[in-house]
Image (cartoon, rainbow, N blue to C red):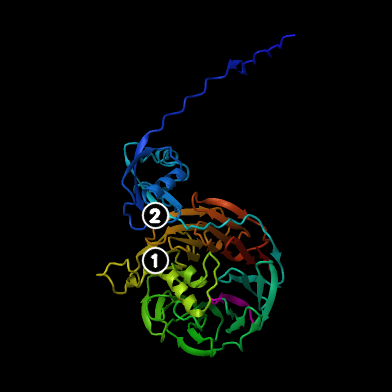
C-alpha cells in the first residue's frame, strides 16, 4: 500500500483573519563612531564607519583590534555623553551607557539627541581584568553578638572578618568555613570601629570607653594593654600605609574629644596628639602622598576638614567650605591603602621589602593618571571633591604644582544629610549614600553627577564597592541590602533577611558581609 501523505496543515486563523506576513527587518543604518578615552578624552583609534546594530561585545572586540596590545584583550565599558540641556529636569541622567548596541541605546534614545548623520563620540573606560561574582543568597547567618553590630571589616586578604558590637566584644570570623574563630574582649564600652593593618598582622579596635586596643588576629590575644589618652569615645581609626612603613605602621585614632592621637604600635606609646578641631573629629584618613610619611585628613563637627603632616603632626591646611558637620571622607586610594600588598591574584609577599614594593607599585599605579583625591560629605546635604596635592601625580601639569585649598567642585543633589561616601577601588567613580533613601554615583575625577540609584525605602547608612568596581552594595535602615549594577543603574539583586536596620556592610572577593541591629552577621 502506498504511503499516504499527511493532510496539509490548516492555516492558523486569528479571529477568523489569516496570520499577517512577518515584517521585513529594518535595514540598520551605518554610522561614524569615534572612540575616545574616558580619562583624558584622547582619541583611541581613527573614526570608523560601522553598522549601528553592532552589539556591545562586538564594539569591544573591534576596539581591541584597533588598539593592538601584546596582552589579552581588555574589557571596556562604553557610554555616550548627552548634550547639556537647560530644560532637563534636575537629576536627569547625563550619559547613555551602551548596554546592547548603539542603535538600540543611542539612536532610539527617548531624548532624540542623536541622528545617523552625527559622528557619535563613544567614551571608553577599561574595566578591571578580573570579575567579581555578585552575591545572590545568604550563605550563613552567624549569631554570637548579644547586641547590635556597629562595625564590620574584612581583612586585606579577605580570609578573616572582624565585627564590633554594642556587647563590648570584637569577634573574629573565619571566612573559609564561615565560622567564629575568636572573641576579643577587653573594651568596657561599645566597640565603635575596627580597622585591620594592611599586612593583616594586627587588628585595632576603638570603643565608647575612649580606649584603643590592639589584637593579634592569629591567636585572638590582646597585644598589651589598651592605649589610653582620649577623654571621650573613639570615632575612627586609620593605619599608616604599608608603602611608607612596612615594619611597624603607626595608628591614628580620632575621638569625640576633638583630638587625633597617633600611636607607635611597637612601643605602644603616644607619638603625638593633634588638637585644633573645636568639636568631635568624626573621621581620620591616612593618605599616602603629600609628604614623606603621608598626611592625615581629619573631618570634624566644627565644619572643617583639616590636613596634617603625618611625621610631626604639623597643620598643613584647613578647608572651611562646608556649612554643617563633616561626617564622612573618602580617598581615591582608600582600597589600595587598605589592602596594601594583596591584590586579586592572592600572592603573599615573602618579606617586608617585597610587601613595601608591591604596595608602592599598586599605589603609584592609581596616581599615574590622577593625584590623590578626597571627597568630604557633610550634614549640609552636599559633598566637596578636593585635589590637595596635585603634584603627587606625574600626570599633573608642571606649572600648577603647588598645594590647592579650593575644592574642584561641589557635588549637590542629595535632599538630606550624607551618611557615607566611598570611592570605587579604581578611583573612577564615587558613591554617596544619604538619609534621603538614595545612593548617587559621581565621576571620581571631575565630580560630575552620573546617576541616582533609587530603591531603598529608608535612610541608606553605608555603601561598599566590589574589588572590580563593577558592583555597588548599599545597607539601609529598611533592613535590606541592595546590589546595584553600574551598567544599567538598576538593582541587580536584593538581599533581604535582616530583621532590623543594617548598620554596616563590607564587600570582598565574592562575599558580602552585613551586620545590624538584629545582632546577626550575614554573609
Residue 369's place in the image compared with 162, above or below, is above
Camera-side residue of 73 and 414: 73
Residue furthest toward the top? Answer: 1
Q: Residue 385: which numbered mark, if any?
A: 1
Quarter of the rendering occupied by the N terminus? top right
Write the start and end of the magenta stretch as one range: 187-199
Camera-side residue of 372 and 436: 372
User: Can you tell which quarter of the image residue 515 is in?
Assistant: bottom right
Which residue is found at the position 47% from the left and 89% from the top? 271
Q: Residues within 10 Å of mark 2 (few under 14, many from 20)?
A: few
Q: Secondary structure at mark 2?
A: loop
Q: Residues within 10 Å of mark 1 (few under 14, many from 20)?
A: many
Place of residue 275 in the rendered image (x, y in percent of width and height, measured from the top left): 44, 85
Place of residue 484 in the rendered image (x, y in percent of width and height, measured from the top left): 54, 54
Residue 270 visible in the shown view: yes
The mark tally for this picture is 2
Please give left or right for residue 337 compared with residue 397 in the image: right
Residue 242 visible in the shown view: no
Residue 8's place in the image compared with 240, above or below, is above
Place of residue 183 in the rendered image (x, y in percent of width and height, measured from the top left): 69, 77
Residue hosting label 2: 69
Q: Residue 46: which numbered mark, if any?
A: none
> In the rendered structure, does residue 464 fall within the stretch colored magenta?
no
How far apart, in angstroms, are the residues tagged by discs 1 and 2? 34 Å
Please give left or right for residue 179 compared with residue 374 in the image: right
Q: Secondary structure at mark 1?
A: strand
Which residue is found at the position 61% from the left and 86% from the top? 223
Residue furthest toward the right? Answer: 1
Which residue is found at the position 50% from the left and 51% from the top? 489
Place of residue 168 in the rendered image (x, y in percent of width and height, measured from the top left): 66, 79
Amino acid at each position: 500500500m502506498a504511503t499516504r501523505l499527511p493532510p496539509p496543515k490548516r492555516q492558523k486563523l486569528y479571529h477568523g483573519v489569516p496570520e499577517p506576513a512577518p515584517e521585513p527587518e529594518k535595514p540598520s543604518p551605518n554610522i561614524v563612531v569615534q572612540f575616545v578615552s574616558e580619562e583624558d578624552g584622547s582619541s583611541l583609534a581613527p573614526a570608523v564607519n560601522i553598522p549601528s546594530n553592532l552589539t556591545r561585545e562586538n564594539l569591544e572586540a573591534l576596539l581591541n583590534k584597533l588598539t593592538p596590545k601584546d596582552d589579552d584583550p581588555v574589557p571596556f565599558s562604553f557610554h555616550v555623553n548627552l548634550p547639556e540641556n537647560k530644560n532637563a529636569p534636575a537629576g536627569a541622567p547625563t550619559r547613555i551607557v551602551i548596554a546592547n548596541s548603539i542603535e538600540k541605546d543611542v539612536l532610539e534614545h527617548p531624548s532624540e539627541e542623536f541622528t545617523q548623520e552625527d559622528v557619535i563620540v563613544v567614551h571608553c573606560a577599561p574595566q578591571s581584568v578580573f570579575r567579581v561574582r555578585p552575591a545572590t543568597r545568604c550563605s550563613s547567618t552567624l549569631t554570637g553578638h548579644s547586641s547590635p553590630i556597629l562595625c564590620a571589616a574584612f581583612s586585606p586578604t579577605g580570609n578573616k572578618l572582624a565585627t564590633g558590637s554594642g556587647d563590648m566584644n570584637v569577634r573574629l570570623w573565619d571566612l573559609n568555613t564561615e565560622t567564629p574563630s575568636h572573641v576579643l574582649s577587653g573594651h568596657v564600652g561599645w566597640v565603635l570601629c575596627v580597622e585591620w593593618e594592611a599586612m593583616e598582622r594586627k587588628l585595632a579596635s576603638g570603643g565608647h570607653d575612649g580606649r584603643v586596643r590592639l589584637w593579634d588576629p592569629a591567636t585572638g590575644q590582646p597585644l598589651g594593654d589598651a592605649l589610653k589618652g582620649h577623654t571621650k569615645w573613639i570615632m575612627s581609626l586609620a593605619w599608616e600605609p604599608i608603602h611608607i612603613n612596612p615594619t611597624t605602621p603607626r595608628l591614628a585614632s580620632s575621638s569625640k574629644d576633638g583630638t587625633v592621637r597617633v600611636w607607635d604600635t611597637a612601643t605602644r606609646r603616644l607619638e603625638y596628639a593633634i588638637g585644633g578641631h573645636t568639636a568631635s573629629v568624626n573621621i581620620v584618613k591616612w593618605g599616602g602622598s603629600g609628604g614623606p610619611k603621608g598626611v592625615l585628613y581629619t573631618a570634624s563637627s566644627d565644619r572643617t576638614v583639616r590636613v596634617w603632616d603625618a611625621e610631626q603632626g604639623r597643620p598643613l591646611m584647613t578647608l572651611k567650605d562646608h556649612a554643617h558637620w563633616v561626617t564622612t571622607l573618602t580617598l581615591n586610594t582608600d582600597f589600595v591603602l587598605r589592602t596594601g600588598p594583596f591584590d586579586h591574584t592572592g600572592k603573599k609577599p615573602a618579606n617586608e621589602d617585597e610587601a613595601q614594593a608591591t604596595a608602592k607599585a599598586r599605589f603609584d599605579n592609581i596616581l599615574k593618571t590622577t593625584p590623590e583625591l578626597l571627597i568630604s560629605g557633610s550634614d549640609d546635604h552636599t559633598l566637596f571633591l578636593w585635589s590637595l596635592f596635585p603634584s603627587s601625580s606625574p600626570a599633573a601639569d608642571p606649572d600648577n604644582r603647588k598645594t590647592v585649598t579650593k575644592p574642584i567642585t561641589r557635588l549637590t543633589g542629595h535632599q538630606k544629610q550624607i551618611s557615607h561616601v566611598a570611592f570605587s577601588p579604581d578611583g573612577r567613580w564615587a558613591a554617596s549614600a544619604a538619609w534621603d533613601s538614595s545612593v548617587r554615583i559621581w565621576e571620581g575625577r571631575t565630580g560630575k553627577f552620573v546617576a541616582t540609584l533609587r530603591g531603598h525605602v529608608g535612610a541608606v547608612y553605608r555603601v561598599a564597592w566590589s574589588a572590580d568596581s563593577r558592583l555597588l552594595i548599599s545597607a539601609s535602615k529598611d533592613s535590606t541590602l541592595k546590589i546595584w549594577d553600574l551598567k544599567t543603574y538598576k538593582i541587580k539583586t536584593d538581599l533581604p533577611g535582616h530583621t532590623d536596620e543594617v548598620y554596616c556592610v563590607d564587600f570582598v572577593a565574592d562575599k558580602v558581609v552585613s551586620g545590624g541591629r538584629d545582632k546577626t552577621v550575614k554573609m
